[in-house]
Each structure stands twice: as C-alpha cells, then as structure tokens.
Image (cartoon, rainbow, N blue to C red):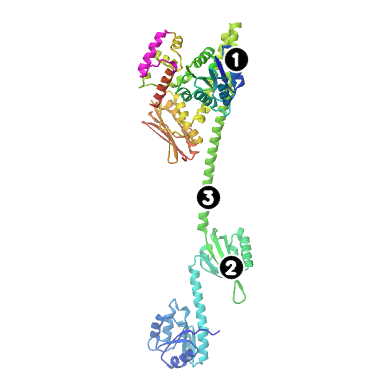
Amino acid sequence: MRLVIAEDSLLLREGLVRLVREAGFEVVGEAGDAEDLVRKVAAHKPDVAVVDVRMPPTNTDDGLRAALEIRRRMPDIGVLVLSEFVEQGYAHELLMNNAAGVGYLLKQRVTELERFVDALRRVGEGGSVLDPEVVTQLLGRRSEGTGLAELTERERETLALMAEGRSNRGIAEDLVVTGRTVETHVHNIFGKLGLEPEARDHRRVNAVLRYLTEREAG
Amino acid sequence: MPEPGADILVVGTGELAAVAARPPLEGAGHRVRTVPDGQGALEELERQLPDVLVTEWRMPRLDGVELCRTVRVRGDFDATHVIVMTAAEDPDRAVTALEAGADDYLATPFEPAELLARVRNGRKAAQLRASEARLRALMANIPGAIYRCAPDRDWTMELISDEIERISGYPPEDFIDNAVRTYASIIHPEERGSVEAAVFEACEAGRPFVLEYRVERADGGETWVLERGQLVHGTNGRTWLDGAIFDISARRQAETERRQKEAEQARVAELRASRARIIEATDAARRRIERDLHDGAQQEFVAVALSVRFLVGHLETTAPDAAPLAQEVLDEQNAAIDSLREFARGIHPSVLSERGLVRAVEAFAHRLPMPVKLHEAPSDRLPQPVETAFYYVIAESLTNTCKHAGASRAAVGIGRADGRAWAEVSDDGEGGAVLGEGSGLSGLADRVEALDGHLEVRSDSGGTTVRAEVPCAS
C-alpha cells in the first residue's frame, strides 16, 4: 500500500515514515505543509494520505482543509487525518457526506501499532476509522428518551465499535464473541434506533454518526 | 449753529404771560402754547410734555407753586425745565418756588433777552438731566455693573452701577474716586496683572476688550466676571474707560461641571477600554499558549512516545523481560499526552478560532454529562472578542450547571438582532446562582462589560438563566 505522509514536525514525520515502512507500507511522498501535500497526492496518487491537521501555512486547520480538498478532487484516495485533539465537529466535516476511505484519529494512536496499521489498511480499502475519543464524545451523554436508552451494555459497546468504523469481524475479535453474535447485536441496534440496516461498514458509520448527531439537535 | 425752536408751554392769563413772555419767545422761533392756569396746564401736559414750562405765580385754578409740586412727582418730568415768574420785591417767593420743584425763577420785571437766555440754559439742563436719567435707568436695568473709570492702574471709578454690590459684595460708593477701595484691589491677585496688561494693550491698539477673570468678594468667595469695555475720549480732553462687568459664575460653574463630567466620562471610557485591552491581551496570550503547547510540547511528546514504541518493539526481540517496562513508560507517556491535550483545550479551544462560537459550544457541550440543547444559533461568525466572551460565559455557566445546579438539562441560545448580540444559558436546576464578588459569574460580567454589554443572572427554584448581551453592529 502506497502512502503520502504530511506532517510538519520533522521528528514526527521521520518516526511515522519509519513506522509505516517497518509495517510494510511504501512511502511515496513526504510533505511539510498543506500545499505540498495536495501537490504530492495529485502527483503520486497514493492509496492513503496521512495528514496532520495543524500545518503551515497558517498553522490552524490547514491539514483538515487539504484533506477535504483531496476528498473532493480525488475521492478514490483514502485520507487518514491525525490530530493532537479530536472534535466531533471536525469528524462530522470529514465523514458525514461520505465516510468511505476516511479516517480521523488522535495523533498519539500511532504508538498503538496494530490499531494504527489496521486503520491505515481499512482507510486504504475504502473503509472508515473514527477515533474512540470522538465516539465517546458522541455516546457519553445521558440518553433518556432516545433509542440509546434501550440498548443493552453489549449493544452499546457494539455501537461504539461500529461508530469507530470496525467491521463485524473486528468487533467480534474485540469483544471476544462470535461473528454471529455481533450480527445479532447489530440487527438489534438498528432496530432499536429505527435505522435502515446497512451492509457496508462505512455506510454504517454514516448512519450511526447521523443518528448520534441528530440526537444532539433533537 | 442755530438751535431748533423749543416747545414752550406758557401758563397764566396775566400781563406777564401774555405780554412779557409770549411775544419774545415766539419772536425767537420757539413754539409757544398757552393755557390760562395750572389746571389747564395739567390737561395740556397730558397731550405733550414741553421742553420748557413758564408759569405765573398767581392763577385762579392751581397756582404756580402747586403746579410745580404736582408735576415734579411725575417720573417723566426730568426733561422739562420749569421757570416760575415771581415779583422781585418778594425774595421768599423765589425760595418757595424752588422748594416746590421749580428749576428757576424770574423776577419781574425782566428783559426779554434774560428770559430767552434762561429758557436756552434751562432747556440744556433739562436735556442733560433727562439723558442722565435714561442712563441711570439703563444702568439699573442692565444685568451688569456699568462703569466709567480712569484708565489708571487703580481703575479709579467715576461712576459704577449698583450691580457691582451684587457681584463683589461692596457698595458702589466704595469705588467712586477710590473712596474706600480701588476696583483693582478686588481683582483676584493671580489675574490682576494680566487684566491690567490686556486692558492697556487694547487701549493702545484702540480696540475694545473682553476679559474673563475672578473677583474676590467681600465674603471671601470668588465671582467669575466678564468685562467688556473700551477707551473713550471725553469732551474736556480727558479719556475714560467705559464698560460693563457681568457675573458669569453660573456659566463658569456649568462649564466646570461639564468639563468635570467630560473628564469623568473619558476616564470611565478609558477604564473600560483598558479593561477590554487587558482581556483581549489575556485571550491572545491564551491562544498563543495553546498553540505553543500544541506545536511544541504535544508534538514532542508524541514523537517521544513514538520512539518509546520503537524501543518496545526492539526490546520484544532482544530483551523480552524489559519490554513490559518500556510499554509501561509508553502508556504513561500517552496518559501525559491526554492530560496535556485537556489542559491545552482548557486554555483555549482551537475550534473556537477555527470554526467559531457555535461549533466551539457544541464541542464543549459534547463533553458534558448532561444533554444541552442549542437553539437559535447564528449562521454568521460574530466578532472575535464577542465570540470569546460568549464562549466563556456559556462554558462557565454550563460547568456551573453541571457542578451545582442539580439540573437534568440545559439550553443554550445565541443570537443577533438590532445591533446587539446575545447569549443565554438556562437550566432546570434548583437555582441559587448569584452574581457576586468572587463568584465565577462576576469574572464573566467583567468580560461582558468590557465590551459595553451586561450580564444578567436570574436564579430561582425554577432554574437559572445567565444572559449576556453586547452591542454588535450587524
């Protein structure tokens, strides 16, 4: 899998490059700012662009804007956005319209090697990745009077992993249950929340995100 | 230069009037009216006052002396000269006539030339008297002290009207010929020199002067006066300063009060501006610290964590016993990164600068263990100082709600209308919030007031509502 890595801190960029190379990825381009990133992605057509949110030129959300531009211009290229902090609002901007091939993670997740590599693969294959921290923000509220209140503890855990973009198989491994059990949980969750069942993982993320966000507005 | 004829009323029926007086007067070009006696004279006077009244002593109805007494009490008779014709052999009559108010007497028999001379002089005297009376009336009625003084350093007064007593507390007689004190002596010592210089300079240049200065009153107080005057040349080669002095204390007082008020307003505005600057500077510093933490410490921590991760991988193959220890270090490092992230967010939420108030409030609300409904959010960004102030108002109020209010839900509204922007946080808690010294709310009030707005807190058993409103041009 071919990657372009955009990170303005040289130290971190070198660490990241070394990390993904050791994990078997090919780094075809490195960028130190948002414009450099868009240019290199357009030139190399990687499978995934790994993007730091805060980068030059303005050192605010340039990376995020570049990621959105890549999504718009080159929808086939996966984008994994890394940030020192994650906000549900930014997740919304990145994933709401089309979560296929998009990931949004806290930067420090790179030290959890297996999860990070898994996230890269999933994004490269058109899946979705959402940081557990964002999911916690979305779920960590009182839920009286909503479908969430009717979920069992296990179903809640399953919902959180779905929102993170995990597949049924991944959820089964995480919860140490059979794939069939997960399927049952998922079925029940969609029923209780009144959502149309979605086969594709990234569409599931969209559905769950939309449900959780609209719960806020309601 | 021949004088125009005078208007003369001759009173009497006797030989004196008809023969001795009338013909020469008419001969000299005067207009002569005649009436037979005093009563007739009074009726004629109602029609028009003459310049000169010449009357006989003895008359049937109202004699000459009675006529004099009657007309002299009239206020408008100063301009008429009264001559009584009396018999020369009785000097007492002359005295009686003068005491009764006659201006002059003429002993019979008299030469026509003498009569004409006395009429001429009398008329002049009466005119002078009349103009003096007019001047005095003017002086009494003008709201200022009218004066005529010598252009000397004492301002030696020839005349000064009564108003000076109201201004200075000293009667006008004090100043006439410097009888008791000089006018210069009551000018405030600090201004005496400059007044003198200004007056002399104006006199030299031949132009009028207008001065404002203080006068020291008899009671020890001060009166602000405005003086207008100019140098005039008298008939006998003398020069005078003629002018008027007005009391302008009330105006000065009002001006002083206005200046004080303006100064006070300026001070308050400056205070508010400086408070706004302090808050602005603090906010800028917080943004900078957050950015420094993000671009510096946080990045470095993650880089270190990554290195430790490599170390863990290395140890797993070379020294498996040591690997768990390194993993522990990595976990602690990640926990430190979490703490640092929360710390930076508390200093300044970057989503506020990057995406605005509404998104920042949404992000804040997401972290609360309580549902927060956001209604009426403006679609446009508000000015940065307003957004920052509102963010802290909303965040602090929601934090209070979670900590103290025992509320089950809260609502946030943000809006903009009619040149004002507002933010409101309400909950269904038990109330008890006060906007007092030392409370977090008073810090919020400072922020809002620095933007010329105000913070309102309503708190009772039905819940608490905190509302901030600031001017905000659309």
Disc 3: CA contacts within 10 A as few (<14), some (14-19) or many (>=20): few
Question: Quick one: SS at disc 2?
Answer: strand
Q: Which residue is mark 1?
A: A18
| CA distance for labels 3 and 2 | 34 Å
Asked if residue B186 shows in the view, the reply is: yes
Q: Residue at x 54, y 85 (%)?
A: B2
> Which label lies toward us, 3 or 2?
2
> Which label lies toward us, 1 or 3?
1
| CA distance for labels 2 and 1 | 100 Å
Residue B369 at x, y = what percent? 43, 23
Disc 2: CA contacts within 10 A as few (<14), some (14-19) or many (>=20): many
Q: Amino acid at mark 2?
A: Gln
Please tell me if label 2 and label 1 are on a single chain.
no
Q: Amino acid at mark 3?
A: Gln
Q: Quadrant of residue A172?
A: top left
Residue A154 at x, y = what percent? 40, 13
Q: Which residue is mark 3?
A: B260
> Is residue B382 placed above or below B238 in the rendered structure?
above
> Which label lies toward us, 2 or 1?
1
Q: Which residues are magenta?
A: A177-202
Q: Which residue is mark 2?
A: B230
Residue B314 at x, y = what percent? 60, 9
Q: Nearer the viewer, residue B163 or B403?
A: B403
Question: Quick one: SS at disc 1?
Answer: helix
- Of the 4 image quadrants, the one containing the N terminus of chain B is bottom right
Q: Quadrant of residue B424?
A: top left
Q: Which mark is residue A29?
A: none
Numbered label tally = 3
Horizontally, residue A199 falls left or right of residue B265, namely left
Disc 3 to disc 2: CB gap under 8 Å: no
